[in-house]
Image (cartoon, rainbow, N blue to C red):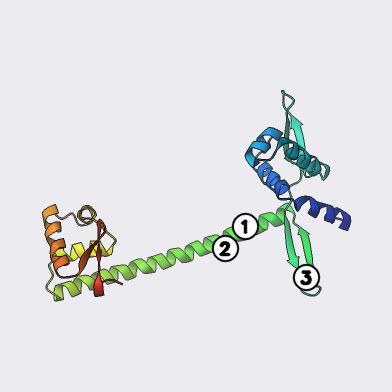
Amino acid sequence: MLEQADLSRLLDILGNRNRRRIIELLREKPCFVTEISERLMISPKAVIDHLQMLEDARILAFRSDERRRKYYYLEHDISIQVHLDVQSHDLVPVILSGEQRLLISLQKLRQMIKERDEIAQKLEEMEREIDHQISEVLHEGKRAGSGEESMLVSVALAHGAKSTEEIRDLTSLPPEMVDRILQNLMDEGIVCKKGTGLEIRGIYAE
């Protein structure tokens, strides 16, 4: 447990945005001064000042290569969460251990997977509803006297096809047949041109 004076000093150090950026960068890999300066667009002198403060706090350390360049790395990684004390309404900083950060990461991963599975389930339900609605469209088309090819073109438009080429790709119908059906649908007021594309319109659109 940190003493109050040490904790205050640590919070003061981490209160600087550029020092926090340096820590985040060094989480990726060790870096030397020039590299930090270029990546974060901070002057080398300012980088050296920040590194010295972080080194004094034993957050960072360095090693030298054969060219005597100092590579800085995290000696002690750190994570801080701030909790609100309901009784005193004071902000209480809590220093988390590596195990606690791992647990938080695992819990976050679990929640993300849970949300993903829920979305996947909703997509499966939506696919079933779409299949049912396509069957309904084909049934209503037959009742209205529309041919099978005409309904295939209509369903392709409902799927978002905007051009005759896209409709041909979805239906595998001959080009001349697609053009003829589209013209009939436009004459009936079911389809209209919008810009360079096509879309369902009027009471037939949502």
In space, the residues marked 3 and 1 are separated at their CA atoms by 25 Å
Which residue is label 3 attached to? 85
> Could you tell me which residue is drawn at 22 percent across and 71 percent down?
137
Q: Quadrant of the C terminus?
A: bottom left
Q: Is residue 125 above or below residue 41?
A: below
Residue type pointed to by label 2: Gln
**Snapshot quadrant of residue 97:** bottom right
Work out whether mark 3 precedes mark 1 in sequence or the reverse, and give the earlier one. Answer: 3
Is residue 69 at all visible to an observer of this figure?
Answer: yes
Q: Nearer the viewer, residue 23 or 189?
A: 189
Q: Is residue 10 above or below residue 204?
A: above
In space, the residues marked 1 and 2 are separated at their CA atoms by 9 Å
Which residue is label 1 attached to? 106
Mark 3 lies on a secondary structure that is: loop
Dot 2, crowdedness within 10 Å: few (<14), some or many (≥20)? Answer: few
| Image disc number at residue 111 | 2
Q: Position of residue 108 (x, y in %)?
A: 60, 60
Q: Position of residue 199 (x, y in %)?
A: 25, 63
The single residue placed furthest to the front in the displayed view is 195
**Snapshot quadrant of residue 33:** top right
Residue type pointed to by label 3: Asp
| Image disc number at residue 7 | none
Mark 1 lies on a secondary structure that is: helix
Q: Is residue 149 above or below residue 9?
A: below
